[in-house]
Image (cartoon, rainbow, N blue to C red):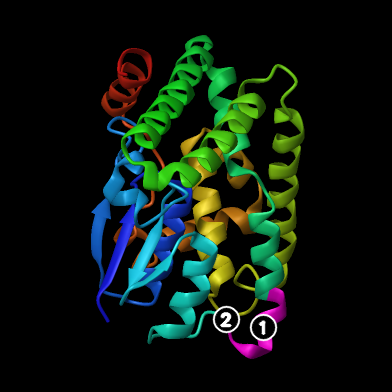
Amino acid sequence: MHNILYSNNSSYYSMIARLVLAEKAVAYELHNIDIHIKMEQFSPEFVSIQPKMTVPVLVCDGVNLADSHQILLFANKHFSGPDLCPAEDEAAILKSLDLHYAFSIEDLTMGKALRKSPIAGFALGCGLKRAARRCQELMRTHTEFKSACENKLKLEDERQRLILSKENNYAQVLAQAIKLCDSLEVELSQHEFAASKHYSLADVVWTVFLARLVMIGFESFIAERKHLNAYWQKMTQRKSYPEANLCTKMPLKFLLKVMFALLFKK
């Protein structure tokens, strides 16, 4: 199989795709999509592959898998390597995946950023408007993408309203994140991995979840829970961890470049 992964280094769901492919030892051609500065998700070439204009996308012999949940299940079923969703544990693993995907990681990430810096809200607002302009420009120059662009603009309008609203649900999302950590602590007190006695798809998503907590400054949620902390340390020692290039820190130089793009680029 010829596999191409369209990904972004710091994208949460891209990290999930990269980690499951690393665990399954899948060879693939990596295309990094700059979604922050160049906003390559709005390029005609990418939109023809992914009309939703999001990453990750796994293209496998002409089949486009356009979200990380699909990629998880596809990778486990169609690639060789360890079975990460064995029949005897399937119900528990799928339940764990549902729990993970029901949580809004963007609300937690953006909510923390907005509270950390008074400039963040203004910059984020500029960035969301810039994305809308790119989408509108694409719709004018490539009418074949009109429907996709209209759908994207509706989603971006709703995203802007939810993220920047003074009545946003950050406190509720933060409480949910803490509850998830509590749940994982209970699970890990009963067995070695997140949903079974063996490493599974559930461990893929929860490893990335913990990596995001570290990235946004919530290491204490992990450290103060004995079993969760031991689990996190063990996950970082797996061969797949560096291979998947999980992002736990945003370099200052990169953040400054993103901030400049959000504030000043069209």
Q: Amino acid at mark 1?
A: Asp
223 w.r.t. 241: above or below = above
Residue position marked by numbered label 2 in the rendering: 85
Residue stretch in magenta: 85-92
Q: Nearer the viewer, residue 264 or 94?
A: 264
Q: Amino acid at mark 2?
A: Cys
Crowding around mark 1 (Cα neighbors within 10 Å: few <14, some 14 to 19, many 20+) is: some
Q: Position of residue 207 (x, y in %)?
A: 51, 58
Secondary structure of the residue carrying numbered label 1: helix
Residue beneath the point at 67% across and 72% down: 94
Which picture quadrant has residue 95? bottom right
Residue 122 highlighted magenta (yes or no): no
Which picture quadrant has residue 99? bottom right
Q: Position of residue 135 (x, y in %)?
A: 41, 33
Q: Main secondary structure of the magenta part?
A: helix
Counting the numbered discs, the total is 2
Is residue 109 visible to the viewer in this orientation of the structure?
no
Residue beneath the point at 39% across and 73% down: 23
78 w.r.t. 66: above or below = below
Q: Are marks 2 and 1 in contact (CB under 8 Å)?
A: yes
Crowding around mark 2 (Cα neighbors within 10 Å: few <14, some 14 to 19, many 20+) is: many
43 w.r.t. 56: above or below = above
Secondary structure of the residue carrying numbered label 2: loop
Q: Using the numbered discs, state the Cα–Cα distance from disc 2 to disc 1 in whole angstroms.
A: 7 Å
Residue lying farthest front? 143
Q: Position of residue 102 (x, y in %)?
A: 69, 53
Looking at the rendered image, the quarter that the N terminus falls into is bottom left
Which picture quadrant has residue 133? top left
